[in-house]
Amino acid sequence: MHRSGRLQRWVGGLSSCALIALATGCGMSTERPFRKDVKTVALDIFDSKEFRRDLELQLTEALAKRIEAETPYKLAKKGVADTLITGEIKEVRQGTLGRDFRTNLPRETAATLVVAFKWKDLRSGEILVDRPNFVQTVDYIRPVGENFYDASQRLADRMAERIVEEMEADW
């Protein structure tokens, strides 16, 4: 009985430690490592070398939403912001990944977006991030009714997600 009592106390103590560790996160942080010296971001509408209607607006809107939702930064006008993001859509490509073996029509298609963007500190002039050829690709399936418009929405959202990831501080 005595041995059993020590075992119960040990297991109980271990359980308490585990609960405390879970509640406090073991000292680990799930906070993303964004720069602490930046509070506001201005966002110019992306330029475009492509003749795809409104793709630059889709990307700019998706990026604005991601910055507001996933970073500690607030969007601000260029005259009062700490930093500025500018960018350009350089290229949009489409390619067939697979064809229907009976009809030889495209079954699965890939859409690729190539952008260049810079994130600049307006206070110091320092370039925080410079990506001259940033690439994102998504697939879409024509037989289920998906088209380039569906793909462009996903492209804009995924590209915005990746740009926000690039805004995390380099440690």
Image: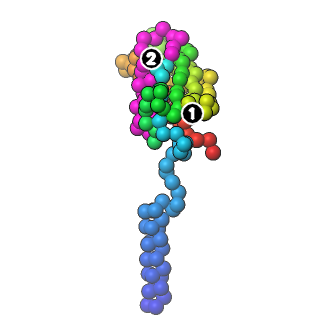
Quadrant occupied by the C terminus:
top right
Quadrant occupied by the N terminus:
bottom left
Q: Which mark is residue 123?
A: 1
Name the residue: 52% across, 60% down: 27
Q: CA distance from mark 1 to mark 2?
A: 30 Å
Foreground pick, 71 / 54: 71
Name the residue: 48% across, 22% down: 44
Q: Which mark is residue 60?
A: none
Q: Nearer the viewer, mark 1 or mark 2?
A: 1
Percent across and percent down for residue 89 are 53, 17
Up the image or down, 164 lies above or below 10; here it is above
Percent across and percent down for residue 129 are 60, 31
| Extent of the magenta region | 47-71
Magenta stretch, main secondary structure class: helix
Name the residue: 45% across, 82% down: 9
- Mark 2 is surrounded, within 10 Å at the Cα level, by few (under 14), some (14 to 19) or many (20 or more) other residues, namely many
Query: Is residue 107 something one can see in this rendering?
Result: no
Q: Amino acid at mark 1?
A: Arg
Query: Is residue 62 something one can see in this rendering?
Result: yes
Percent across and percent down for residue 90 are 56, 15
Sequence-wise, the earlier of marks 1 and 2 is 2
Query: On the image, which quarter does residue 143 sit in?
Result: top left
Q: Which residue is mark 2?
A: 55
